[in-house]
Amino acid sequence: MSFRAVPRRRWRWPLALLAAFGMASPQARERAGWPPPLLPAAQQADAILVYKAQRRMDLLREGRVIAAYRIVLGGAPVGHKRQQGDQRTPEGDYRITYRNDRSRFHLSLRISYPDEADRRQAAARGVDPGGDIMIHGATPPGSRADWTEGCIAVTDEEMEAIWRRVPVGTPIRIAP
């Protein structure tokens, strides 16, 4: 009995799929169009307004709304975030400090919570103020249920549009 060597077939993953899971080189991800590029400066937002009670987020340019999104929040959205695990979204004036194209929630934009006042308030109460507050994707289309741990969530498609318009440093005001 003889065995004939059968060449092994190599599986070739589509580049876009590898890039989506962060498994391709930065150059390969760039060629695959990931992450989505920022739009030209004239089309970028220069401010973000979040209205928690209305579950709405507006991107603004020179005081005018250039895009509006329905959002979902944490499981206990009423009131300002006071500590880690309270499932509240902070209220106040912050900035976008980081753009994460490898987020487990599709894409994410880090909000500068906690600021110094938030840290002082938490320290006075002997608690951790929490952190990692983001605007991110992963909300199923049509969902209205609040499910985050205090973040602001939209659909993946909406997050890609937001990602293209919001650079690091953009101010964000989160209103009750």
Image (cartoon, grey):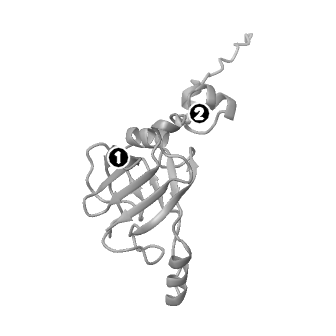
Name the quarter where the N terminus is drawn.
top right
At x 53% / y 68%, what residue is drawn? 131
* Residue 82 visible in the displayed image: yes
Q: Residues within 10 Å of mark 2 (few under 14, many from 20)?
A: many
At x 37% / y 56%, what residue is drawn? 49
Decide: is 95 above or below 63: below
Query: Could you say which quadrant of the image residue 169 lies in?
Result: bottom right
Say what amino acid the circle numbered 1 marks: Arg
Residue 114 on image: x %, y %: 53, 71
Secondary structure of residue under mark 2: helix
Decide: is 120 above or below 22: below
Residue 95 on image: x %, y %: 51, 59
Say what amino acid the circle numbered 2 marks: Ala
Secondary structure of residue under mark 1: strand
From the viewer's side, name the closer residue of 92 and 149. 92
- In the picture, the disc for residue 176 is none
Residue 51 on image: x %, y %: 31, 60
Name the quarter where the C terminus is drawn.
bottom left
Q: Residues within 10 Å of mark 1 (few under 14, many from 20)?
A: few
Decide: is 43 above or below 95: above
Give the total number of marks visible in the rendering. 2
* Residue 138 visible in the displayed image: no
Instruction: Name, please, the residue furthest toward the front.
Output: 62
| Mark 2 lies on residue | 19
Residue 116 on image: x %, y %: 56, 76
Q: Is residue 42 left or right of residue 10?
A: left
First in sequence: mark 2 vs mark 1: 2
CA–CA distance in space, label 2 to label 1: 35 Å
Query: Could you say which quadrant of the image residue 73 lies in?
Result: bottom left
| Mark 1 lies on residue | 64
Of tags 2 and 1, which is closer to the observer?
Answer: 1
Q: Is residue 94 left or right of residue 91?
A: right
